[in-house]
Image (tube, rainbow, N blue to C red):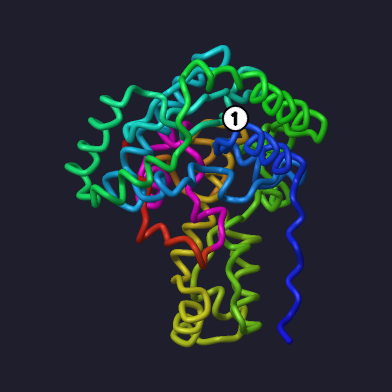
């Protein structure tokens, strides 16, 4: 008899989204620009509700250049949402339209709600989009046409009539995050002059938390990285602390985690930098000092290498999925880098 699997507890926000999707017969998702759907229980969402996951969208994203264009659309929509005072419609490069509602905390945009992945443009424009996608990405014509036909077909006017529903979701998120203290409290006050170890330990280490080494030695090594990644730390020092030679530690660490020690250390630092960029008002120089880099240039090089974008560009993107989702279902940053916009 197989082991029983515990049913995942769904957040109020997840149930809210599913109800709206069921009522409208369209896919709804929330692009989270500030981690609020990752580390707040009432707002937690699975990956499928944090991005466009329709079969058509997944097909487009399966092509490297197609995915790159999707990221550019995401960047553009985030910029538009920052300027808009209310809901607006946007048709992506692949021909699908979304109703977009910005989510803000004060004047700062923290995300956006999307409803649609629907066909609203005239048939002539739809056919032109299909021709372009087939030409540019070499998709099979019959398959792509079938996937698009399965998407909701609705007029732009009818789609925009659902704005009040999305406004309700937005109001819940903005109210919930206020009630549960989703503010830059400890992180906003963290600075080079007051950045204590206790405060740095409060920053989530999404990437390291998902590593599952088997041996006690490597488990201890991961704990050392988690509690000291912002300090000078070396492979030799860590190997001594866990009772292994440098060579044995190197082999065992990579075998059990899938990454080198240096890679995990850099990931921990960049992970913290990403979080602070989203959740605080610290400048890049302050963040670089806090997470253990000698200067802005050093962190900038590591940041671009791991994320594929500058800190400024990243502010309008979702956090890279490999930092927050199941490592078993996501490629490592070395294999799947965020395209430079």
Secondary structure under the numbered disc 1 in the rendered image? strand
Residue 2 higher or lower than 334, as above or below: below
Q: What x and y, as percent, mark residue 47?
A: 57, 50
What is the residue that sits farthest to the top in this orientation? Answer: 85
Specify the quadrant of the image occupied by residue 68: top left
Q: What x and y, as percent, mark residue 234?
A: 50, 68
Residue at point 70% right, 38% down?
A: 19
In front: 271, or 9? 9
Horizontally, is 193 left or right of 284 in the view? right
Residue 9 higher or lower than 262, as above or below: above
Residue at point 31% right, 26% down?
A: 123
Position of the N terminus, as image quadrant, is: bottom right
Q: Residue at label 1?
A: 110
Horizontally, is 104 left or right of 133 in the view? right
In front: 253, or 107? 107
Which span of residues is magenta-colored?
297-326
Specify the quadrant of the image occupied by residue 170: top right
Residue at point 40% right, 45% down?
A: 56
Q: Main secondary structure of the magenta part?
A: helix
- Is residue 316 in the magenta section? yes
Residue at point 49% right, 14% down?
A: 83
- Is residue 23 in the magenta section? no
Q: Confirm whether residue 341 shows in the render.
A: yes
Q: What x and y, as percent, mark residue 153?
A: 45, 31
In front: 194, or 338? 338
What is the residue that sits farthest to the left in this orientation? Answer: 135
Horizontally, is 198 left or right of 163 in the view? right
What is the residue that sits farthest to the right in this orientation? Answer: 179
């Amino acid at each position: 008899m197989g082991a029983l699997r515990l049913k995942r507890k769904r957040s109020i926000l997840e149930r809210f989204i599913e109800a709206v999707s069921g009522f409208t017969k369209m896919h709804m998702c929330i692009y989270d620009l500030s981690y609020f759907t990752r580390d707040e229980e009432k707002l937690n969402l699975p990956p499928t509700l944090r991005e466009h996951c329709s079969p058509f969208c997944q097909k487009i994203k399966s092509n490297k250049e197609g995915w790159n264009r999707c990221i550019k659309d995401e960047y553009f929509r985030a910029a538009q949402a920052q300027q808009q005072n209310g809901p607006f419609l946007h048709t992506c490069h692949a021909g699908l339209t979304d109703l977009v509602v910005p989510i803000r905390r004060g004047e700062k945009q923290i995300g956006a709600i999307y409803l649609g992945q629907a066909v609203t443009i005239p048939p002539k424009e739809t056919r032109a989009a299909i021709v372009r996608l087939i030409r540019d990405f070499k998709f099979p014509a019959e398959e792509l046409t079938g996937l698009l036909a399965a998407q909701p077909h609705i007029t732009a006017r009818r789609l925009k009539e659902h704005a009040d529903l999305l406004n309700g979701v937005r109001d819940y998120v903005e109210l919930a995050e206020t009630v549960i203290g989703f503010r830059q409290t400890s992180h906003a006050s963290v600075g080079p002059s007051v950045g204590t170890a206790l405060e740095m330990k409060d920053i989530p280490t999404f990437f390291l938390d998902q590593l599952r080494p088997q041996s006690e030695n490597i488990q201890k090594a991961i704990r050392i990285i988690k509690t000291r990644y912002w300090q000078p730390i070396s492979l030799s020092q860590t190997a001594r602390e866990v009772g292994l030679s440098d060579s044995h530690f190197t082999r065992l660490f990579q075998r059990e985690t899938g990454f080198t020690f240096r890679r995990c250390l850099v990931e921990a630092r960049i992970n913290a930098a990403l979080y602070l960029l989203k959740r605080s008002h610290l400048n890049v120089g302050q963040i670089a000092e806090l997470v253990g880099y000698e200067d802005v240039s050093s962190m900038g090089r590591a940041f671009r290498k791991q994320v594929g974008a500058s800190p400024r560009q990243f502010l309008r993107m979702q956090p890279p999925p490999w930092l927050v989702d199941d490592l078993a279902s996501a490629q490592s940053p070395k294999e799947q880098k965020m395209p430079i916009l």
